[in-house]
Amino acid sequence: MDPSSGNLQVLNALDGAKTQWYHFTAIVIAGMGFFTDAYDLFCISLVTKLLGRIYYYKPGSSKPGSLPPEVSAAVNGVALVGTLAGQLFFGWLGDKLGRKKVYGITLMLMCLCSIASGLSFGGHPKGVMTTLCFFRFWLGFGIGGDYPLSATIMSEYSNKKTRGAFIAAVFAMQGFGILGGGIFAIFISAIFDSHFKAPSYEVDPIKSTVPEADYVWRIILMVGAIPALLTYYWRMKMPETARFTALVAKDAKKAAADMSRVLQVDIESEQQKLDEVMEGSNHSFGLFSAEFLKRHGLHLLGTTSTWFLLDIAFYSQNLFQKDIFSAIGWIPPAKTMNAIQEVYKIARAQTLIALCSTVPGYWFTVFLIDKIGRFTIQLIGFIMMTIFMFVLAFPYNYWIQPKNNIGFVVIYSLTFFFANFGPNATTFVVPAEIFPARLRSTCHGISAASGKLGAIVGAFGFLYLAQNRDPKKTDHGYPPGIGVKNSLIVLGVINLLGTLCTFLVPESKGKSLEEMSGENEEEMGERRA
């Protein structure tokens, strides 16, 4: 029997709809949120060195000022902690109040906190850092809500055939966000550097940081509000998804009316059919029930564990790119540049990596996910990341010789490429497809929060782990670590574990959401009985 025959006509219409204009508007509206998320989360790594020079300069030191370890950890990590909290809270709220209502709240929070984080108060280092961290926590909280809501809205609007590509396209906007952040930082730092000439640090430590440099980081952080503001109106105009309206709010009439408008076809409301189905079904099992554990327990374990392991590797690389570039000589020693030139060089290196490996990886996923499936892409991605990490780690002393720098960057870029044409995209797509409508946003939020926990482990663990074993060679204020080589070996092992956990996740290619979540089986079973 056709599994979709037990489904409401409005849901069948969405599943069978040809790709049309509303799909693309949904991608852009949800995708601009993700563009903003990535810009806001990653732009901090462009300006941390500058913050160190402005606020933590030590007179007489041979090196420019740098953020103390605990301040650096707070500035880099507080948004990740906020994101984790936001994913859990807004994921749950999206299943309670509806996707659309909560979507507007997260966007406004992101806009306000982007602007506020650039307005950090006072001239004293402690005051500036405290207010910066405060607003970046709430910025992260808003960004966290965007994960489950964007994925759920896109999956519920999509058709069966190209759903994977549509959800992946929303996520792929993250690549453009990272790219946008890098390009904007290059642009701003080039303008400031040409208008406010300054000598390098070794020539004149004081004059190398011009007073105007304080505007550079503030402008870079505040511009993150613009793309989100541009889509606010369109987000508010989007109707609630039919799956929420019909299956959770149980209003088939409104779902049919909304989707008739969107799809521009006549759809029967079938309220009676919905009532009959709901009356007889055990649709009400909750997240903490034995029934959920039996049906979806392993799936949730699969989505949370793979996202957790992936993000340890992904964020440890991403947040510490600039350190890796300095270590292999892509960015000159800090004392040979003035403060604004350093922002320019870091942004240029990050933009090159994004352009060559990050962005192409996302789009490979978009084009191939509905052809070769989520499982295959995730498995290949984890396996390749494991191989490349070990290739970088074992002959590490060979790679750090100047003549081999380009080879190191190529393999480093390939690791990124296979993260994005691999688990970084699929871990976002799958949780939006395999859980029941009334728990979909919550389960996506839990999976994403598990990922952010991995990001926190990756970001902070790596800060300390990658320090030199020789106490004399560590960064100021850090205890000796295990060195970059051993850190890369650890990351290789983590990717290997990710490969194994991938086997817990089911393939959802070409199936309807109700088929994947088992909502139809319940309905069909009840009716036959």
Image: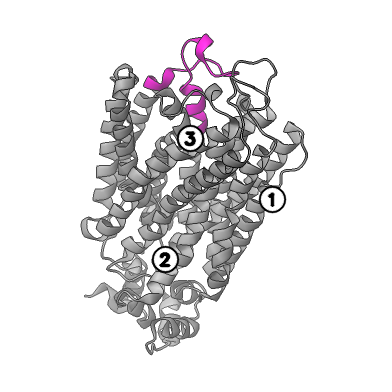
Which quadrant of the view contains residue 395?
Answer: top left
- Residue 2: percent from the left, percent from the top? 23, 75
> Which is nearer the N-term, disc 1 or disc 2?
2
In the image, residue 472 sits, relative to residue 217, either above or below, namely above
Whether residue 503 is visible, yes or no, is no
> Which is nearer the N-term, disc 1 or disc 3?
1
Secondary structure at numbered mark 3: helix
- In which quadrant of the rendered image does the N terminus lie? bottom left
Q: Residue type at mark 2?
A: Ile
Report the residue marked by disc 1.
116
Residue 347 belongs to the span the image colors magenta: no
Q: Is residue 125 left or right of residue 1?
A: right
| Label placed on residue 27 | 2
Q: Is residue 91 left or right of residue 281?
A: right
Q: How many other residues sit within 10 Å of disc 1, few (<14), some (14-19) or many (≥20)?
A: many
In the image, residue 150 sits, relative to residue 181, either above or below, namely below
Query: What is the spatial separation of the Cα atoms under label 2 and label 3, in whole angstroms?
Result: 33 Å
- Residue 64: percent from the left, percent from the top? 61, 23
